[in-house]
Amino acid sequence: MEKKVCCVTGHRNLPQNQVNYVKAALLREIEKAVADGFTCFMSGFAEGVDQYFVEMVMEKQKDDPSLELIAVIPYQKRLDSLRAKGRTYEMLEACRDVVVIREEYQPSVYSHRNRYMVEHSDRVIAVYDGREKGGTVRTIRFTHQMKKELREISVGEIHLPKK
């Protein structure tokens, strides 16, 4: 049986008054994914949403060791800096696999990382505040193009374009 893979995308800087809401919503989405048969969870390891997601899956692994984490890191120096910090080192150690997209930094490394995660996932959880620019919205658009399942957690004030 093919394993079901779920990844996360979201903003690095959440308004402080939204962090607990986002963490609770992320936990519900992870629990729903596990209930729906997902056993593999992928994160790009950015600050904020990505790392909250990893911490929550690590907590779930304590009760269900069959759950797997995969780190998808945009470039080698980013991996080196994550390994140099105690908490993210522990998070990387909890991963079954670490995928490094590029050896060297290039302006496109983050979009390549996000594309890789969507291509290799069945479900994408997006924490999104409605902004029209940035990696999260591009990842959501790519999720739609790939016809993958999207679970969206809306955060902050959604600003619609003026007509």
Image (cartoon, rainbow, N blue to C red):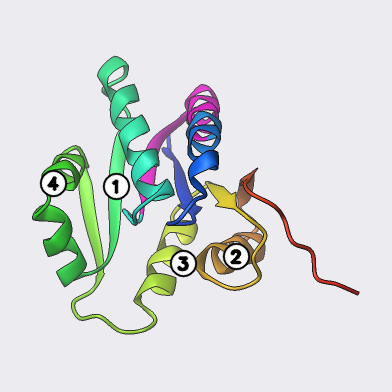
Q: Residues within 10 Å of mark 4 (few under 14, many from 20)?
A: some
Quarter residue 109 falls in: bottom left
Report the residue marked by disc 3.
Answer: 115
Which marked residue is nearer to the observer: mark 1 or mark 4?
Answer: 4
- At 36% from the left and 84% from the top, the residue drawn is 107
Residue 77 position within the rendered picture, expressed as x and y whole percent measured from the top left: 15, 70
In the picture, measured across the screen, residue 76 lies left or right of residue 150, that is left
Q: Disc 2 marks which amino acid?
A: Val
Residue 88 position within the rendered picture, expressed as x and y whole percent measured from the top left: 19, 46
Point out the tag, 1 or 4, that comes first from the N-terminus.
Answer: 1
Quadrant (top left, top right, bottom left, bottom right) of the N terminus:
top left
Marks 2 and 3, how far apart at CA: 12 Å
Residue pushed farthest right?
163
Report the residue marked by disc 2.
Answer: 137
Q: Residues within 10 Å of mark 1 (few under 14, many from 20)?
A: many
Residue 125 position within the rendered picture, expressed as x and y whole percent measured from the top left: 54, 45
Report the residue marked by disc 1.
Answer: 70
In the picture, measured across the screen, residue 139 lies left or right of residue 72, that is right
Residue 81 position within the rendered picture, expressed as x and y whole percent measured from the top left: 14, 62
Marks 2 and 1, how far apart at CA: 22 Å
Task: Provide the secondary structure element on which disc 4 rests.
Answer: helix
Indicate whether 32 appears above or below 18.
above
